[in-house]
Image: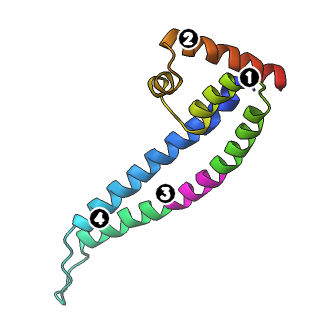
Amino acid sequence: MKAKEFLSQGVLLHKEIIEKRERIESLRAIAEGIKVTISDMPKCSNRNLRKMEDMLAQAIDLEAGLLCLNVRLEEVMVEIADVISRIEDSRYRKLLEMRYINFMSWEEIQEKMHYSEPRVFSLHREAIKEVEHKS
């Protein structure tokens, strides 16, 4: 696996976790908004109750998957942090930490480091080469 792919694993897992959380919140909000009427009147079934049960079941399944993703993210982040910590140049380390540990955008990195966009991208390329060299 190339250095950039290795470092990007955390970012991708982080995005997937955010998407699952949003989906869970959406399902729960929809399920909570469904009105269910329970009565003694004979009916084949209560469609709203079934919809709510299905949505809550989906949310529970997503939450189980979310737990697995969180564990995997923690494992990956330990590996990434270990690799980054072995980089000697503090600028490279700082940039890689901001991007791949703190999940900062390029704009946020530019602002924090007080560098232009081309300079940040240039440093990033150099940092990636350094990671490849250390691996």
Q: Which mark is residue 62?
A: 3
Residue 126 falls in image quadrant: top right
Task: Please give the residue where the numbered disc 2 appears in the rendered image.
Answer: 119
Residue at the location (29% across, 64% down)? 31
First reached walking from the N terminus: tag 3 or tag 1: 3
Q: Nearer the viewer, residue 109 or 17?
A: 109
Above or below, comparing residue 117 to residue 8 in the picture = above
Front tag of 4 and 1 = 1
Q: Are marks 2 and 3 in contact (CB under 8 Å)?
A: no
Q: Nearer the viewer, residue 118 or 46?
A: 118
Residue that lies at the very extreme toward the bottom in this rendered image:
40
Task: Please give the residue where the numbered disc 4 appears in the rendered image.
Answer: 31
Residue 105: x and y in percent read 48, 28
Residue at the location (36% across, 57% down)? 25
Q: Are marks 4 and 1 in contact (CB under 8 Å)?
A: no
- Decide whether residue 103 is among the magenta residues: no
Inter-mark Cα distance, 4 to 1: 52 Å
First reached walking from the N terminus: tag 4 or tag 2: 4
Inter-mark Cα distance, 2 to 3: 41 Å
Q: Which mark is residue 89?
A: 1
Residue at the location (63% across, 29% down)? 94
